[in-house]
Image: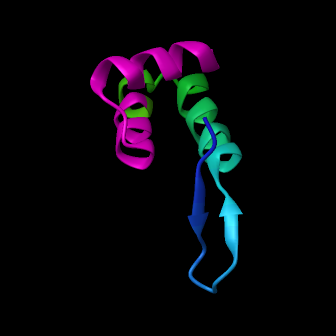
Amino acid sequence: MQIVLDRGDGTPENSEALIENELRSMIDQGEEIKAIKMARDKLGLSLLEGKNYIDRLK
């Protein structure tokens, strides 16, 4: 999956790597549920997809 977002200055930015870094940080801090919620919000995933996404990042 590749997510490309507009940074607001007209330049698209591949933000999936940035999101993954933030999610990994949350996982490392023991905040898996918050990471799942963030993954769902930022990537438009269902609950199951969000859980599976976070499990793959572990």
- Horizontally, residue 47 falls left or right of residue 29, namely left
Question: Which residue is drawn at the image coordinates 64% and 54% (left, top)?
Answer: 15
Q: Where is residue 8 in the image (x, y as percent from the top left)?
A: 56, 82
Q: In which quarter of the image is the C terminus?
A: top right
The magenta segment is 36-58
Total count of labels? 0
Image vertical order of residue 25 relative to residue 22, above or below: above
As for residue 46 lying within the magenta part, the answer is yes
Q: In this view, does 9 lie to the left or right of 49?
A: right
Residue 8 or residue 58, whichever sits in front: 8
Quarter residue 41 falls in: top left
Q: Give the colour scheme of this rendering.
A: rainbow
Query: Outermost residue, bottom direction?
Result: 9
Magenta stretch holds residue 1: no
* Quadrant of image for the N terminus: top right
Q: Position of residue 42 (x, y in %)?
A: 43, 48
Q: Position of residue 18 (x, y in %)?
A: 67, 49
Q: Is residue 56 above or below residue 44?
A: above
Instruction: Say which residue appears at 63% left-offset and 86% top-offset.
Output: 9
In terms of secondary structure, what is the magenta stretch mainly? helix
- Above or below 8: residue 28: above
Q: Position of residue 46 (x, y in %)?
A: 30, 28
Q: Nearer the viewer, residue 22 or 16?
A: 16
Residue that appears at 44% across and 37% down? 39
